[in-house]
Image (cartoon, rainbow, N blue to C red):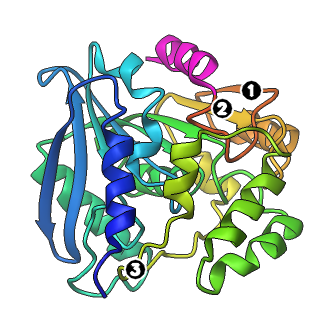
């Protein structure tokens, strides 16, 4: 099925809001064509941004400007997820395929090494990739990551069930209102997140990262948690990160929820990222 035209219009409108010029790359690969939205200094150290499930790479619009000054920024649309990546190649059968996809994408984009910044599902993917290819990950930034430090709460899973059946816009909006406690979200980002996609999707279900695996992450790691997340308990996640990740710096944004990150907290997030970098 073709991707919904309205979804693509909303995607492009969000990308137009980026405060720096965007240079899109469409990279052919085994599983399809991957969109990488690049910006910033071509010769600078590389930051790879990996979005949360369903959010698309446009979700970084409020933070990317502060990163692009001295870095080359590559924001990836995850293959098999909503966005401008086209999943029309070999089936993605599991985590090894996802790791291979990111290998070939970074190779084609000319990225031998990078700091990976991931939110939610993207935090899980970034962590798994750091375990898979540690020599390619110079640093790791995890924004309220999924299935990395603590399992997702059952209440969150149950509230998300309606999204598995057709992803109706009203159900998406209701779920986000619940998780964010009714906080005002950016209207245009919310319209994109709720828009019907239409194209084929295949998200690999995240496998919980074990404490033993966390202990092998040798790169400097920044963990930024959402103090009011309804997905996972921030205090419990912070304890696990401090106990098991060797070079972890841990901070909590006290008023953030899982879905107000990253776009609703540009000042706090930008300051934390600049200090880390």
Q: Nearer the viewer, mark 1 or mark 3?
A: 3
Q: Nearer the viewer, mark 2 or mark 1?
A: 1
Which residue in the structure is indicated by mark 3?
Answer: 198
Residue at figure coordinates x 63%, y 18% from the top left: 268
Horizontal side of 266 relative to 90 (left or right) equals right
Q: Nearer the viewer, mark 2 or mark 3?
A: 3
Give percent across and percent down for residue 100: 27, 68
Mark found first going from the N terminus, 2 or 3: 3
272 magenta-colored? yes
Q: Tell me how far mark 2 sits from mark 3, CA to CA.
A: 33 Å
Residues 228 and 165: in front is 165
Residues 25 and 214: in front is 25
Q: Secondary structure at mark 2?
A: strand
Which residue in the structure is indicated by mark 2?
Answer: 224
Give percent across and percent down for residue 46: 26, 30
Q: Secondary structure at mark 1?
A: strand
Residue at figure coordinates x 41%, y 79% from the top left: 201
Mark found first going from the N terminus, 2 or 1: 2
Q: Residues within 10 Å of mark 2 (few under 14, many from 20)?
A: many
Assign the C terminus to one quadrant of the image.
Answer: top left
Horizontal side of 166 relative to 76 (left or right) equals right
Q: Which residues are magenta?
A: 265-277
Give percent across and percent down for residue 71: 27, 21
Res 253 label: 1
Q: Residues within 10 Å of mark 3 (few under 14, many from 20)?
A: some
Q: Secondary structure at mark 3?
A: loop
Q: Tell me how far mark 2 sits from mark 1, CA to CA.
A: 7 Å
């Amino acid at each position: 099925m073709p991707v919904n035209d309205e979804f693509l219009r909303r995607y492009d409108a969000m990308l137009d809001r980026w405060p720096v010029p965007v240079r899109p790359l469409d990279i052919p690969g085994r599983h399809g064509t991957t969109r990488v939205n690049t910006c910033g200094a071509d010769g600078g150290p590389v930051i790879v941004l990996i979005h949360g499930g369903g959010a698309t790479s446009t979700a970084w619009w409020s933070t990317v400007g502060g990163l692009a000054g001295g870095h080359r920024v590559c924001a990836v649309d995850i293959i098999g997820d909503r966005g401008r990546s086209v999943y029309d190649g070999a089936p993605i059968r599991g985590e090894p395929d996802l790791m291979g996809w990111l290998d070939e994408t970074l190779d084609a984009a000319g990225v031998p090494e990078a700091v990976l910044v991931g939110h939610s599902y993207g935090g899980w993917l970034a962590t798994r990739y750091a375990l898979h290819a540690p020599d390619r990950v110079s640093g790791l930034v995890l924004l309220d990551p999924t299935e990395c430090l603590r399992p997702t709460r059952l209440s969150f899973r149950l509230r998300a069930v309606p999204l598995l059946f057709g992803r109706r816009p009203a159900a998406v909006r209701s779920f986000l209102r619940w998780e964010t406690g009714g906080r005002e979200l950016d209207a245009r980002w919310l319209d994109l997140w709720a828009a019907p996609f239409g194209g084929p999707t295949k998200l690999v279900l995240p496998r919980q990262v074990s404490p033993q695996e966390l202990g092998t992450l040798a790169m400097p790691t920044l963990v930024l948690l959402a103090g009011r997340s309804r997905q996972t308990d921030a205090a419990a996640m912070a304890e696990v990160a401090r106990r098991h990740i060797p070079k972890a710096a841990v901070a909590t944004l006290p008023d953030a929820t899982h879905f107000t990150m990253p776009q609703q907290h540009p000042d706090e997030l930008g300051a934390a990222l600049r200090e880390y970098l």
